[in-house]
Amino acid sequence: MTVLIAGAGPTGLTLAIELARREIPVRVIDKADEYFQGSRGDGLQPRTLEVFEDLGVLDQVLAQGIPAPLLKIFIGGKPAGERRMGELVDPTPDRPYPNGYMLGQSRTEAILRERLQDFGVSVELSTALVGFTQYDDRVVAELSTSETVEAEYLIGADGGKSIVRKQLGIAFQGTTDDSIRMLLGDVSADGLDHEYGYWFAGPDNPMEGIVMTPLSGGDQFQFGAPLVSNDADTTLDGLQGLVDKYAGEGTAKLRDLTWSTVWRPNIRLAERFRVGRVFIAGDAAHVHPPTGGQGLNTGVQDAYNLGWKLADGREEVLATYETERRTNAMRVLGISEDLMQKHIDGDETALDRGEDVRQLDISYRSPDATAPLTTGDRAPDSPLTDANGNKTRLFELFRGPHETLLRFNPTTPTTHPHAVTITSTPAPGTYASPEAFAFYHAEDGTEILIRPDGYLG
């Protein structure tokens, strides 16, 4: 089986790793002539960190990124307090990474590309998908390099303007609000302490201002500022004018603008995530506002869901991709849209980030008891001690491209190749949820199947 992936962003790269580590031939093409350099999606949610642990890239992500910084708020040039976009919480046995992390998207992509190369797969730049034709047993794709490629499956991870989605004729339902525009990008700022983030606003409207969030690996900040005129000045001078307006002249001297863009609220969800042997994922399937930091994370988890199902190959399993991921994307879009509306309305709670943005509560439960995958809750982590007295964790047992069968004090044998016998569980302690406690203390004889993506099967 060969899989062709159009798009080498976080979604396409995650899917390629998932396939390559299962020894499935995969090609990743991208129409860009060079890799993107900029922060763009810089917030990594806790569930994505768990996915990255399984993929073998978490150590690099944590080494290169930073925790969400404390935000210093200035109104009319005067200090007005400090806050975080979501209070920090302590790890628990079932949630080892409960807080979000900050890492510029280009750095995340570089880490994923390096991991993909461990499997002998490289991204093919300057290679666009021109068109494709699908048959009962294959997809034939035409590339801009004049090459024709036959693959068993084609995946469109090619962004909001997805060629794959458009050729499939899938409706991209939603809205674009041209009345709201923001200037986004990366810049260095002399005069600001890089250990902190900043919110600068005018005295008349505390919710209208410029946000500066520190980026790891240098002295740059990611900025976001409203544009109130029809002309968008994306130059360094234009951005300096916005900083002077909201923070006051002399507060910060900007330099080294490396990336900027004009953003408009574009909230869309594809009507379908699949047609035959062609699937879409990430921004090709759903486009989010930046509020809540959900877009990149949702795309990564699309890929994490789809990878093992492509490797499985059974139609009844492949059919669950759209059901599970479109339902989740719809829910997440609602969270992001609500936060964006709070910003527009001037609601100060728009800066708060609750439990729902962490994506630890994603569930693929199905009301159909005859469906092949019906339970679908996230399997929690837990500390364990093996038969030799060595410390381990459930996540370490789950790691890898396989399902895991947990057997609590079993009385019968099994032939499952990845069965784990659990004879005792941690004593009651501080757990994030009653469900996790119940999971740890399953009754004797209970067997729980954990899907390759870490959800109950």
Image (spheres, rainbow, N blue to C red):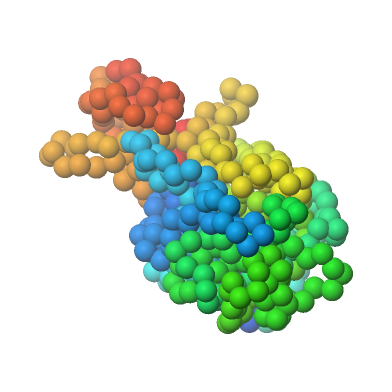
Q: Is 47 placed left or right of 73 in the picture? A: left
Q: Nearer the viewer, residue 13 or 206?
A: 206
Quarter of image, res 320: top right
Depth order, front residue of 161/387: 161
Relative to 149, does residue 91 appear above or below in the rendering? above
Query: Would you say residue 413 is visible in this rendering?
Result: no
Quadrant in the picture for residue 135:
bottom right
Residue at (51, 70) in percent of width and height: 192
At horizontal 65% and vertical 69% (from top left) the residue drawn is 248
- In the image, is 449 to the left or to the right of 130? left
Task: Judge left or right: residue 384 versus residue 100.
Answer: left
Quarter of the image where one finds residue 362: top right
Could you tell me which residue is drawn at 39 percent across and 69 percent down? Answer: 118
> Nearest the camera: 426 or 322?
426
Residue 399 at least partly seen: yes
Vertical order, 389 against 307 (above or below) = above
Of the pair 291 and 209, the residue shown nearer to us: 209
* Residue 446 x, y percent position in the rendering: 35, 21
Residue 443 at x, y percent in the picture: 33, 17
